[in-house]
Image (cartoon, rainbow, N blue to C red):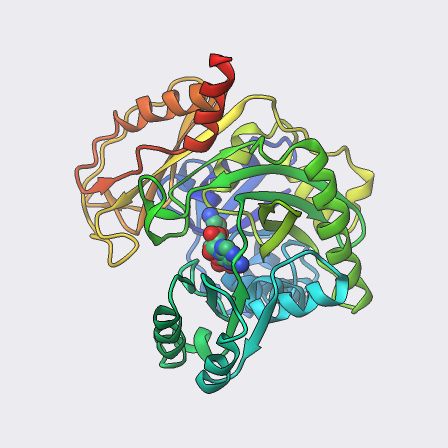
Amino acid sequence: MNILLLGGGGREHALAWKLAQSPLCTALFAAPGNPGIAEHAKLVDLDLEDHAAVAAFCAGQGIGLVVVGPEAPLVDGIADSLRAAGVPVFGPGKAAAQLEGSKGFTKDLRAEAGIPTARYVRCMSADEALAELVGFSLPVVIKADGLAAGKGVIIAETADDARAAIEDMFGGSFGASGAQVVLEEFMEGEEASFFALTDGTAIVAFGSAQDHKRVGDGDTGPNTGGMGAYSPASVLTPALEADVMTRIIEPTVATLAARGTPYSGVLFAGLMLTAQGPKLIEYNCRFGDPECEVLMMRLESDLVELLLAVAQGRLGAVPAPVLGQDTALTIVLAAKGYPGTPEKGAPIALPSAPEGARIFHAGTAHKDGALVANGGRVLAVTALGASVTQARDAAYALADKVDFPGGFCRRDIGWREVAREAALSAE
Ligand code: AMP
Ligand code: GLY
C-alpha cells in the first residue's frame, strides 16, 4: 500500500521509521518531511492547507492511508476533506479535533461526560476574567483558548501576575488563541501522559510517557513543546491506567460518538496524578512530540496495520498493540534561543547510533549539502535501556557525540524516575 505522512518534525521521523518497516507499506511519501524522514520516505511538496491538492495527490499516487502527524491540519479539517474524497485517514475530523483545538470545548465535554478535571471558567473578556479571578485560590492557571504550541498556559503565583496574564492574553499576545481565556484551579501532583488508539468504538491502550516541558534543568524556565521524555511512565501504574481508561478515555470516546462526532485517531491525555486520583489536564488529538519518539522505539507491532485499522473503523479486529518491556528515553537537542527565537542554520554533524538507539530529526535541513538546524527543537536523541537510568545513560552518551555547537539540551531528563530507581536500589 502507498502511504502519505503529513508533517516534518521528530514525531513524524519516528512515525516514518516505523511505517516504512511494515510489510504492508509499498511506498511512503511525506509532506513536507525533513532530512531524517527522507531516509524512509519520498518527500513531496504539498500545501497542507490546500486540501484539494492533497486529495489530488492521493488519487494520483493511489494512496491507501494518510497519517496526519501535527494538530494544525486536523483542527483545520484535513481528515474530513480526505475522507470525503474516499481516502482512509489516521486522525480525527475537525469536530473531534476540537478536543485539542479549544480548551473550552474540552472543558465542557468533561463536564458532560463526568470526567475528573480541575474546576474552571471560560471567559470572553478581560473584565469577566478579572471578576472571576477572585473565586480562585493561588496559584491559578490561566490558559489561552486555542492552539498556542504549548506556550499559552500561565501558572500565576500572585494576583498581580494573574491580572497581568489576563490582560496580556486579551491584549493579543497569543493572537486569536487568546480571544477566549480559561481560568482553572491549580492541580497538585506529578504529570504523566497516556495514549490510546480509537476508531470511535474500539479503544486500545498505546502506552504512557513522561515529558519535560520546561526548558531548564530542574523544571525551570519557560514552557516548551517538550525537552525530553521517557516511556513507560511507571508512576502511572497498571491500576491507575485502568482508572484512566474507565473514568477518562472511555467516557470521552462515548460522549463524542453520542454527539455524532466520533473520534478516530490517537487520544493523547495529559494527566495530573493527584491525591484524589488521575485528573485530565488536557487532550491532544495527535501523538506527542517527543513522546512519539519513545513510543515508536518500544513498539513491536506493525504500525501500518494498527493505523489503517483505526482509519477503517476495524480496530477491534486487529491484535492490540505490543510495546516492549524496555524503557525508551529521548533527549531533545534544541537550537540556542528556543523557546524564544531559535538560531537557524547552525551546522550539525551526527554520529552513527549504536544498536538500541536512534537520532530522530525534528528541525533540520540540508544547506549546501550540509546538515543544519532549522527549528527550535532540532534532534531527538533516543535510546532503549532495561531501566530509565540505563536508557538515560545510553541516550546522553549518544547525545554527547552529536557535534552541534549551536544547540543545547537539558541534562536531567528522566530525573524523577532516576531518583526513584536510585531509592529502590538503595533499599
Ligand atoms: P496544557 O497546555 O493545558 O497542557 O498545559 C501546559 C502545562 O501547564 C501542563 O503540562 C501543566 O504542567 C501545566 N498545567 C496546566 N493546567 C494545570 C492545572 N490545572 N494545574 C496545574 N498545572 C497545570
Ligand atoms: N510534548 C508535548 C506535546 O506534544 O504536546
Q: Position of residue 287 (x, y in %)?
A: 55, 47
User: Does 255 sit left or right of 87 as displayed?
Assistant: right
User: Does 104 sit left or right of 125 as displayed?
Assistant: right
Identify which residue, 145 or 394, lies in the foreground.
Answer: 145
Image height check: is 426 above or below 146? above
Image height check: is 130 above or below 336? below
Identify which residue, 101 or 168, lies in the foreground.
Answer: 168
Residue at x 37% of width, y 66% of height: 158
Res 13 quadrant in image = top left
User: For the image shown, how many numbered marks are present on the structure?
Assistant: 0
- Residue 219 visible? The answer is yes
Q: Position of residue 418 (x, y in %)?
A: 44, 25
Image height check: is 134 above or below 266? below
Image height check: is 199 above or below 204? below
Q: Position of residue 97 (x, y in %)?
A: 62, 63
Q: Position of residue 241 (x, y in %)?
A: 69, 38
User: Does 304 sit left or right of 314 as displayed?
Assistant: left
Residue at x 56% of width, y 28% of height: 298
